Amino acid sequence: MTPSSTLRDRRRMQTEREIQVAALRIALRDGYEAVTTEMIAAEAGISLRTFFNYYPNKEAAIVGRRPQFGDRTLAWFQSASGPLVDDLFEALRQILEDKQPNRDTTKMVDALLSQMPELVPAFYASLQILKDQMADLAVSRLGEQARPDAEMIAEIVAHATANAFRRWAHDETMGVDDLVRVARQQIVRVGEMISKRSS
Amino acid sequence: MTPSSTLRDRRRMQTEREIQVAALRIALRDGYEAVTTEMIAAEAGISLRTFFNYYPNKEAAIVGRRPQFGDRTLAWFQSASGPLVDDLFEALRQILEDKQPNRDTTKMVDALLSQMPELVPAFYASLQILKDQMADLAVSRLGEQARPDAEMIAEIVAHATANAFRRWAHDETMGVDDLVRVARQQIVRVGEMISKRSS
DNA sequence: GCATAACTTTGCATGGTATGCAACAATTGC
DNA sequence: GCAATTGTTGCATACCATGCAAAGTTATGC
């Protein structure tokens, strides 16, 4: 999915990250309102036009690369046979293992979201591709008539993972396995709250 | 919350709806990409500047007024004592009863979302105020330490309601009570799927 | 009624956002 | 090395969004 060891691809990935970090630095320093695409380009040492070759808009630059399942993981899921939610989480674990998320960048994102909660929806929206893929995977188990339920399950799993991700950012003792476990726990807890008839 | 029988307020509400319908008509006719704020203003018979007095951007015009709980409903919730999710749905029912949503407009929204699923996240995002209010209500029951769970519950309830709303749009036999019942059913179903260890 | 306060609509000026295009530069594969 | 491919940039263009002030409308108090 990601490695691609050619110089071009490594540079592209590097630039992509540099742009995101530049955007986050400016937003944390001057506030999200004050950020302009020109500032981000200047801070990242590229032209404005090149900025738009990497991200379609400044919001996308701040949330960074949108995660998605690779072909291997999608194929693995089709042959998996555990409970649906467990298999979805295992697929997520595979992405995280592959992608090796950067703790410092995640910390900056977390700090920004704490300062400006109005960005939280944009951040969740960046998981849309992943949600769509998870919904498709769930549909392949539950049948097409259950698509609305599949989409809701995908939404819940993505939400729980995003929560756990923010916690992981500032807890250095947590590994990827803990991250997934924490998310899984929240889902079971909330699932019981909404299906049972108590408080 | 809404009525306010002065001429100014009625006109304001009327213009607000006219702008939304104009935006939806253009999007359904020419595609979302082709919509410009100038077109919407022209179609609604107002100046471009006035358009921006009503909606902050064209996306907001398409999704229309963002629903939120009124003071009466918020106060009612504090004295309610049913299961959390049931009380949240009762509060939603109160909004729907109050607001009398327009079936034709909802049909246009539904048609647009079917044609362009990439707008679905924007549509859900328009429920953010409502989600925040529901999260606060849930926190008042569960305690501040349960805020992440409260936010997830709010997300799920909003999602289910939005689903049911689209179904309501093209099923004239459904009333507001049925809408809420359908949403409630989906939640119980999904809650069982994700908390139990089967499927 | 009528004067005046409160609010709404509008045009204009301004600056940020985003894309297509074409020229030039860098890298890849051979 | 050299040709093909891909990446970067400046420029032109169109759209998006806001502040401000003038002109028009509605509401209010008497």
Image (tube, coloured by chain):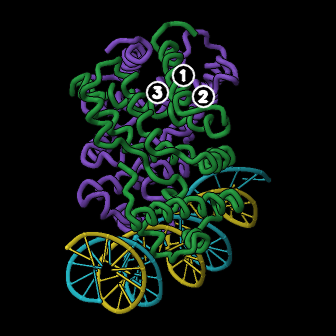
Chain colours: A green, B purple, C yellow, D cyan
In this view, B124 is above or below B55: above
Kindly identify the amino acid type of the residue bearing the numbered disc 1.
Gln
Chain-order first, disc 2 or disc 3: 2
Q: Is residue A171 left or right of residue B92?
A: right
Residue A186's disc number: 1
Closer to the eye: label 2 or 3: 2
Q: Label 1 crowding class (10 Å Cα cut-off): few <14, some 14-19, many 20+?
A: many
Residue B181 in view, yes or no: no
Marks 1 and 2: CB-CB under 8 Å? yes
* Residue at the extreme top: A197
Instruction: Give the Cα separation between the discs numbered 2 and 3.
Output: 12 Å
Measured as percent of width and height from the top left, residue A115 is found at 69, 47
Residue A89: x and y in percent read 42, 28
Q: Which mark is residue B156?
A: 3
Q: Is residue A83 above or below residue B121?
A: above
Tag 3 near tag 1, CB within 8 Å:
no
Specify few, some or many for label 3: CA neighbours under 10 Å numbering under 14, 14-19, or 20 or more.
Answer: many
Q: Amino acid at mark 2?
A: Pro
Q: If the image is split into quadrants, where does the N terminus of chain B sit? A: top right
Q: Quadrant of residue D23?
A: bottom right
Task: Residue at 37% x, 63% y: name it.
Answer: A6
- Which one is in front, A81 or A108? A81
Asked whether B155 or A124 is in front, the reply is A124
Residue located 60% across and 38% down the image: A166
Tell me how far mark 3 sits from mark 1, CA to CA.
Answer: 13 Å
Residue that badge 2 annotates = B148
Compute the Cα span from label 1 to label 2: 9 Å
Q: Amino acid at mark 3?
A: Ile
Question: Which SS class for mark 2?
Answer: helix
Q: Is B19 left or right of A139, judged from the image as shown?
A: right
| Rendering quarter of residue A132 | top left
Q: Dot 1: what SS?
A: helix
